[in-house]
Every structure is written in C-alpha cells, then in structure tokens.
Amino acid sequence: MSTQLPDQVEEESTETDAEPTAAPQERRLASKRDRAGEADRRRQAEEADKALDDDTYHLKVFRYDPEIAGKKEPRFDDFHVPFEKGMTVLDALMYARDTYDSSLTFRHSCRQAVCGSDAMFVNGQQRLCCKTQLSDLEAPVRIEPLPHAEVVKDLVVDMQHFYDQMEAVEPYFQTNDYPDGELEEQRQTPENREKVKMSTRCIWCGACMSSCNVAAGDNEYLGPAAINKAYRFTMDEREGEEMKQQRLKILEQEHGVWRCQTQFSCTEVCPKDIPLTEHIQEIKREAVKNNLKFW
Amino acid sequence: MSQSYDRGLVEDFGRWREFTAGMWAWIFHKFTGWVLVGYLFTHIAVLSTALQSPDAYTTTIQSLESLLVVRILEVGLLAVAVFHILNGLRLLFVDLGVGLESQDKSFYASLVLTGAIVVASVPTFLAGVFG
Amino acid sequence: MAERYSSFKVGGRRWLWQRITAAFLVAVLAFHFFLLHFVNHADEVTFGMSQGRMQELTYFSLMILFLLTATFHGVNGVYNALVNQGLSGTQETAVKAVLGVASIVLIVQGVRTALAWAGGVPI
C-alpha cells in the first residue's frame, strides 16, 4: 500500500501539466477514468497484500494449568494458524488445538453465537470468539480468559459468581395476575413485546460482567447481565403489578442498579447488541418514580 | 467479581488503550470530582481567614493572587470545573435516557468545548500577574 | 401499603439527590466562576467587596445553598466512589463517620465565614 501513494501524486501532477487547456468535460472524464483505474489498482494491491500477510495468523494464547507442575506459571503460547476466508477466532483456536496442542483448553459449543460459551478477552476487549472475524483483528491476536474472573485452566474461567448474580434476580417468568377464564392465554401486546425484545437476547456469556469496572471492584453488584434479565421481566406487563414491585425491590438495593456508573463498557462489548446501559437507566428511573408516587 | 487468580499485568493488558469513550468520560469525571471536592475544602479554609479580620482576608487573597503558580492552578481549576459541568450535563441526559446512542460524541464535544473555554479564558485568568 | 413505600431505599434516594444537586450546581458553579473571575477579577478581591455582595439576602442565601449542595454532592460522590471499589462493613461505617464529620466542619466553617462578611443574617 505504501508504494501506491508516490505514484498517485506523480500521475496527478502529470495529468494537470499535460492538459491545462482541455475542455472542462474532457477533464472531468479524464479524472473519472483516472479514479476508476486507481481504485482497480488499489484493490489488486490489497488482495496481493492479503495473500502475503494473511497467509498465517499469529495467535498469542494465554496458558495456565494449576494441576501440572511445569504449567503453574501463566505464560503465552504462540500459534501460527493458516488463514482461510471467513475464519473466526474460535476457528483459529480449534485449529491450534487440533493441530498443534491438544491440551489447549477453552469452552465452545454451538459456534454460532447462541450458546454463549466462548466469550474471551481478545486483543484487549471482551468478545465472543465465534462471531469475531480474524480479519477484523490486528495481528498478533492476543487471546486471554475473561478478566476479573478466576482462571480454571487456559482460557476457561469460573462462571459461578456470574451465575449467582443471574439467579439473584429470579430470571424466570412468574405471575399471580392471571387472565379471567380458566383457559384464557396470557397475552402480551406487540408494543410490550417490542419493549422487552432486545433484553431477551442475552446468552449469558458474561462479557458485560467482565468488562464492567464497577462489578470488578464491588462483589455484591448485580452486574449488567442480571439487571438486563430483571428488566426483561420487570417490563413484561403479563407479570402484573405485584410482581413488578417485588422485582424492583431486588433491583433497588444498595448494590443493585445504583452502582451502575454509565461507563457503557457493557453496551460496547455485548455480542448481542443489547442496549444494557439504556435498560439499567430505565430501571433506575422506574425505581425512583415508583417511590416518588407516595411522597 | 470473585477473588480472581492474580494475572497481574495480564489482567490489565491493553485495557487503558482499549478504553472506549464512556470509560474515559467516567475516569475524567471521577478525577475532576476528586479535585473539585478537594478544592472545596481548601477554598473554605482560605476564605475563613475573613474570620480573623478584614485585613487578614484581603492580604491573604491578594498575596495568593499575585503568585503566577496560583493563577496557573486557577486555570487548571477552571478546566476541571468546566469539564465536570459539561460532562455532568451529559450524564444527566444519560440518566434521563436521552441520546444514549451518541454518548461518545457528547463526550468528545464536552472535551472540545472545555478546551475552547479554557483557552479563551487564559488572558482573563492571568491578567495583572505579570504587571 | 404506605409503609411499604416509606422504606425508600437509601441508594435510590441518594442517587436522586445527587442528580438534583448536580442540576442546581451546574448553574450556580458557572455563575460563581463567571462572577468572580470575569465580572470581578480574582486579584482585585477585598473584604469589602465580598461584604457588599454578602449583605444582600438573595446572594447570601444562594451562597449558603451553594455550600450545602456542593458539600452533599462532593461528599456523596466520594462515598459512592469508595462503595464502587467494594468498600463494606466496618470500613464503610468508619468512612461514613469521617465524611459526615468533615461535611459538618465544612458547612459550619462556611456559614461562619458568610456570617462574618454579612455581619449577621441579612434580612
């Protein structure tokens, strides 16, 4: 790419030198031809660059195994993985494991961003490996387990605390507000469904919790995923008023929603694009309004 | 989260470089907040020289204001206060659920505006100190 | 039902007050800076001029309110920052006490100074 620039400048200057008196239309057409040619050349050069550089991808992978004497000290292993178009970070990790080192350990299951098993810290950001294209990343690609969680082995972290926080908000539908008629369905309006739609997309991958600066410091903070889960049910009209009060009671504790500092880290890393901060803010306002009513 | 295996630098690798706008805004807001609350206490302490005698107050303030260091610190204080005000407004909007999609842009805007206001105020803040 | 709502969770009330004081302080702090650096100049401050302003009830009460809100906003902000870092238990109680005493000292000292200028509450 770098060789392109001087050429371009040269061409432009000869162009203007050669036809100072040419008719405006001719000049426009000439420069148009020039631009088209330039784009062609640039594309070719880029493809050639790719073929050279992306031949193999350099991965630096965090390794740690407390059970084996020689591996107790954390270190980074290098893997050079042959690149294929469309390759994700997870594909690369699987290639490395299957080809070079079968002891490389990481969680994965569905490989299509549904199960939420393979959130990791890739090039300094929490990402879901199966939906992160290698070609979007700068080499060497540095892969680490999620920060602010205990490492069990290699890229596997202990998710128990995350699951505990999720359980704490009672992440399931519950109601005592039944419709009249024994066989009547519990219907939800399209508008209400639309309201909770994004919040239902959570796959419990834990990327948001790991990215949250406050959750890292405050063990009791519910964290973005749990609050989003609570939002999904609090805002669901079918649960009824009494249930809503019960849910708000959990959320408005000292270490509930109030700890959120609107850093937007969770919203940035969420692989399902859930507007987490927006949901947390809405719960805060809901809690305040709820309590102001009786003042 | 739970007590983590101490990964030391590994844990924080690349973190500050990867920080997004919202995170920087939080860091700056927190830093300026600490500075402002620290200044509040100092401010009241200096002003309370007025309790001794009117003259003590006037001489204290005027001798402080004749120092170039104090004037430069005042420009710093202005920068800190203006940023805290502008980013505070941004946070109030975030709390009201307004413009959450452009929270990064509003952060950059508050930075730029802070810079502009501070630069424009430098002459007023340093006036007379060299004379 | 009323009792249930009367237990407005402390976190929420402080969160709301932090925002209310913020909105007030944005305006008053900007005014304060403008008045004392642009309208009047910092190097020309004298006891007499401060006295002149403070003897007006509007200005006096605005400054007292400024002191109260700024102290709350600042001290509550510090407390929040520490809780966010995971402060809890005895340490939290100790910090609460220290911050509480500091705020009282600050407010008392501030009010005394204001009264010294105004020579009593200007009514």
Image: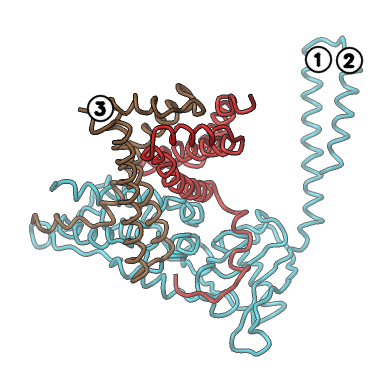
Chain colours: A cyan, B red, C brown
Q: Amino acid at mark 2?
A: Glu
Q: Amino acid at mark 1?
A: Glu
Q: Residue at x 45, y 45 (%)?
A: B42
For mark 1, what is the residue? A26
Residue A68 position, x and y percent, is 63, 89
Question: In the picture shown, does residue C34 fall above or below A108?
Answer: above
Mark 3 Cα-neighbour bin, 10 Å: few <14, some 14–19, many ≥20: some
Q: Nearer the viewer, residue C44 or A255?
A: C44
Q: Residue at x 35, y 57 (%)?
A: C99
Q: Residue at x 81, y 16 (%)?
A: A27
Residue A235 position, x and y percent, is 26, 53
* Chain of the residue under label 2: A
Mark 1 Cα-neighbour bin, 10 Å: few <14, some 14–19, many ≥20: few
Of marks 2 and 3, the one in the foreground: 3
Cα distance, mark 1 to mark 2?
9 Å
Mark 2 touches mark 3? (CB < 8 Å): no
* Chain of the residue under label 1: A
Residue A285 position, x and y percent, is 28, 47
